[in-house]
Amino acid sequence: MDKILEAVMQSSYPMYVKQSLARRVIEASKQPIDTEQCWSMLELSTKLFFLGDSRFARETAREVLEVYGRYHPEEFEEFFNVRFILSLLQEGYGSLGKRHAYILEYIHLGLQFVADKPSTEEIFRLLRVEVLRIVCERPSLKVCVRVSKILTSYPQCIPEGNHQLLFCQQLIRCIGQFHCQSEGEEGIIQFLDQVNRVSTLLQNIWKLQTSLILPSLKELFAIISLTDETESPSNALASVVQYIPLQLMEGIVRNLANADSVTDAQMMTSINRMIDWVSWPLGKNIDKWIIALLKGLAAVKKFSILTEVSLAKIQKVFSKLLYPVVREAALSVLRYMLLSFQHSPEAFHLIVPHVLQMVACLSNENTNSAASCLEQFAELVHCMVFRFSGYPDLYEPVMEAIKKLPVPNEDRIKQLLGQNAWTSQKNELAPYYPRLVSKSDTGKIGLINLGNTCYMNSILQALFMASDFRHSVLCLRDSNNQPLMMKLQHLFAFLEHSQRPAISPESFLASSWPPWFTPGVQQDCSEYLKYLLDRLHEEEKTGKRISQTLAQTSCSFQVKKTILGNRTLVEQMFGGRIVTKIRCLKCHSISAREEAFTDLSLAFPPRDDPTTKFPKTTVPPSGPLKDTGPKNLEGQDQQSTSSPHHGTWKQTSEKNQGKATPVEMSDKVPSRDKDENNCSLDGGQDLSASSSSEGTGSKKCSLTLSDLINHFLCPEMLTEDNKYRCETCASLQDAEKVVELSTGPQYLILTLLRFSFDLKAMRRRKILDNVSIPLMLKLPVQITPHRSENACIESSGRSTLANPRQSATYDLCTVIVHSGLSSESGHYYCYSRDCMDKDGHKPSSTGVKKFASDKHLDMEIQWYLFNDTRVSFSSFESVSNVTSFFPKDTAYVLFYRHRTHGQADSVIDSGSSKSHGDAALSKELMEAISKDNIKYLQEQEKEARNRAAYISPLLKSPLWWQDFDKDSDDDASAGGLGSATGGASGSFHGLVF
């Protein structure tokens, strides 16, 4: 009969024929058969069970074994003996290894037919030893499932005595190594079911022997507290905790929190891993254990651990609210973490940027679970806003999102905060640990301070946020003749695409360092900006000359002329032109000189002389404002100076001057009523606040930017010792000098000359007057005939100094702030925003009709605060009020961008705004960025592995999006919250693992 069955298995008959023949053999096996035939059939069916090449072969073998176990029990018992089982467990079968799941499945199948036989006890004794050996060898999940099935069906096989505890401990270690290999929902559900089968075996053993629970838990803690593991234990360990009786919780937590043998690093590692268990869908009471342990640590005043754990994990816990299957546990843990973290708003502020998306997702879910979660979370938000008031810019969008949800009263809020506060937190909190945070939620990247280099960092961030300039720099391809520009392109590319929270500008600093700067000493950012733009301009001009020389033999005359005629990028973006006119008051002839500029330096109006008044906002078409001192006509490296009787305000600071000509512009400011309606020069309202001019010896004063510009534009009378030599009159004559803006730049840079030299005290001082900065600036541009650079034209006619003017509108995009009392000390940081003509939510291209809605426009364009490595969201209110709150923090350098609208283009330099997307970088640059990003991820992984060894001052908080991919890896690639839906199959794998 065995030969027949073997021939059927090896035949090429159709499957239905083979199945019919196999069924006849099985039916025949139910009849009495001699012992030799039984053994032959048992050997053949065993072979087919282990080595069969098809499912049909294995199922047939299983049926044959079952038939012989039932109808030929004596022969089966003789065949299924201890020696045979031992050989299977220690040697395997043929090519099948001894730890293959088929081995245990075969034994489980055979046990049901010998369980009541005399030889059974000997088999059970063997299995008690072998199952312990198996789990000690860290088998696969499938093998552990087979072991669990055998021991659940036959508890007699469970190891006894001390071996029973060892078996539980080793089984827990096995569970800690289970990882899901499938990404499909079906495979994950199967994995969860298999893990649950294994952990249920532990529950059954603990029910029989409760004294094993605590030693088993000790082993569990030893696994999750290991700080030198290359791979984190599996979240499947959460399936073990759910079976621990809650009545043991208090004693276990108390002993653990007070154990001297447990280091802070081990405790922090274990809690971090336990918090990861929140994502385990089948876990029960996990949140209760986590909260109990956190409370236990607070009771023994281990606040440093609590601080680090909360900052490291609160975003991960918050993200789990998206998933209904774990929402309740995640919300419970999040609730305690937020309400207990009362010494700093940092934990709450980590999740604030993502609250709007979370509220939107939960609102769209339309389930009772989501609705309940929203109400409880809104209560949490109200508690946190109550506890950490003073951040209206951060909280306003959040409060708007939850305004329709129930609001708890003040008593309820105080009750919640009081119940969950850490014990004696105000007096006994561990020192705050600075942390190396992940990339800012703003999406922007900071710059590392290399030792008093904040002046450079602020300038570089301002140039980077000048979107037209940034795009042009990133699009450059000819790198041979512009090494500094290529360094800037490299820096901009990393600021645009790097994954790091901050990058080092060391290479660019070395290339752009002014030779007269002293290393490690604070410098003037305005001076650095002038030097940098001059270097970039001269470098490109040199490159164009070289290109022209190389093109002489291969290019036509027209191409060579085009190469020489093209303006540099600095000229296109920042270059404007001013005309200085001097009119002889005797013959009325006019001398004019047109010059280029890249920034305008605005001196403060003198106010220590009672005869001197601030310039009025309105500038008459031809009537000059009060003369406040001569302007520099020839372009020497000096600041604008006041009249001799204003000595203490005389501007002589070399720090405020670069090599470029001191820039001057003309401005015809509209009437005050029109200014207010259009939010023009003076911003439509007085946002400034009176501040003490500390260090200036002057009384309090409040200024607007219009005051400084009007002072700059005041016609100057050249009289007495400062008379003008008129070539027409051929003698010294009284004259009037006027400066006009003939061509406005794409980006208007204004420097407020705050650093003066006090001739009485013989020292440099800073003018601390608050200056109101308008969002939108309207400048009149003179329409004059084009003149070549540095041309001096004499006119003998009686024409006036005023020419027709056309309005040019500029939007504020950057404010660089100096904090301190001297240009040689203090600190620089900058506020900035992206200003582009794009879809109306950037500066509008619809003309002046929208000028009255600048506040609304500002709401649509996000402001950022760049402070070296720290980048955060900000607002125009913060920009306007910074000096009011911090008197030594004053606006110093301003960037305005020209707003394009039709006819204004004719009076603005041709480097006007473009509609552009992300610049396409060169292959080499993209490879460099990708390589650095990979290196950064490797650094993050290494730090994540090492940080449990000590409470690291550089402990990183996990990125919001990372835990949607792999909870066990804090440095996994980012995922998207917006695409996640509660319980969706596409996100199921990321939820659990």
Image (cartoon, grey):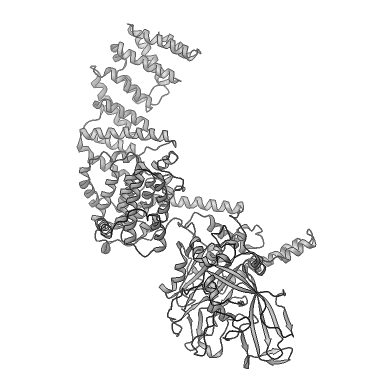
Q: Quadrant of residue 382?
A: bottom left
Q: Is residue 779 left or right of residue 374?
A: right
Residue 600 seen by the camera: yes
Q: Nearer the viewer, residue 312 or 816?
A: 816
Q: Quadrant of residue 421?
A: bottom left
- Residue 647 position, x and y percent, is 52, 88
- Residue 844 position, x and y percent, is 57, 62
Q: Is residue 652 left or right of residue 213?
A: right
Q: Nearer the viewer, residue 801 or 980?
A: 801
- Residue 218 position, x and y percent, is 26, 43
Q: Is residue 488 left or right of residue 565?
A: left
Q: Quadrant of residue 402?
A: bottom left
What is the quadrant of the N terminus in the image? top left
Q: Nearer the viewer, residue 359 or 806?
A: 806
Residue 517 seen by the camera: no
- Residue 229 position, x and y percent, is 37, 45
Q: Residue at x 34, y 35 (%)?
A: 195
Q: Nearer the viewer, residue 120 or 617?
A: 617
Image position of 22 with respect to 542: above or below: above
What is the quadrant of the C terminus in the image? top left
Q: Residue at x 44, y 13 (%)?
A: 19
Count of numbered tags: 0
